[in-house]
Amino acid sequence: MSKNILITGSSGFVGSALYHYFENETMHHVFGTSRRSGSTTDEMGDITDPKFIRRLHAVLPHMDCVVHTAAMARTSDCEKNKERCRGINVDATVNLDNAFKSSKFIFFSTYAVYDGIHGDHTEGDCITVHDPANTYIATKITADQIMSTRRDGVVLRPSAMFGYDMEHKGNYFTQLLDKVQKGEVMKSPKDQFFNPVHVHYVCEIVGRIIDRDLRGVYNIGCPEAESKYGFNKEVMQKLDMPLSLLVGVEGDSDGIPRPDCQTIFSHKIQRDADYIIPSLDHMIDRLHKEYKRW
């Protein structure tokens, strides 16, 4: 049965991918809102403005599901403007939640809410409520805690998402590609581990969550744990990029602290959604095909 779906942050990397997925590969009706205009933005506005959220709800009173991807995610920007970061990542989330109480609400949190000490986190593990590593993580933890109490809500904790989309320079792969194209050296941590995931598979999982009316907290990541340096090296080798532009480092190259071991298990979503998350090699192969196509 087709549903009406609102996507926030619809002009961003994840939001636009979801918009195109629902528009092209499902029978659902999708509506996008963002601060920026574009083919995936149906209503332009600032979700930190309560008046805009009230107006949005007045225009769209019968949304079956809200998929909230809008966020301030670049860690350096979050450190420079902490109040703005909290306004987008926390206050806007609360205001949207209050406005769309009758809608299913899918909130994009992050794998970074876990402590990052031992790794291999499951959804039952405690999140880092004391002394989070940076402002971005602190705000996502606050919003995660709030949204986890919603009776019919879904909190997603995806690992770093990637894909080839040069309209959106903020995703993990396009930042690497931008440096390579400029001939700049990419400093990449050898001691920070994660489970990167291609955005296409995240879209398919969100579709299954809606269709099966799932609720609760779910990790999303590839099956293999990899260092950020190792991932970048695999991608660059696959895409025939010069490895001389990749340098492995210990710790944070930009001075902003991040947890070292943010690996997650994604068994729960695969079981509940009856979905097998592909291997990292498969995802990188898909990235390679996208790169060659464009």
Image (cartoon, rainbow, N blue to C red):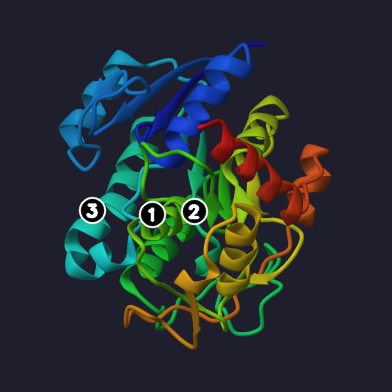
Q: CA distance from mark 1 to mark 2?
A: 12 Å
Which amino acid does the dot numbered 1 rest on?
A: Gln
Q: Position of residue 91 (x, y in %)?
A: 28, 51
**Mark 1 surroundings: few (<14), some (14-19) or many (≥20) residues within 10 A:** few
Secondary structure type for disc 3: helix
Which amino acid does the dot numbered 2 rest on?
A: Phe
Along the viewing direction, whichever of 255 and 207 lies nearer the viewer: 255
- Relative height, residue 96 to residue 233 (above, below): above
- Relative height, residue 276 to residue 129 (above, below): above
Residue 22: quarter of image:
top right
Q: Position of residue 50 (x, y in %)?
A: 19, 37
Q: Point out which mark residue 87 bears.
A: 3
Q: Residue at x 79, y 46 (%)?
A: 270
Which mark is nearer the camera, 2 or 3? Answer: 2
Residue 176: quarter of image:
bottom left
Q: Earlier in the sequence, mark 3 or mark 1?
A: 3
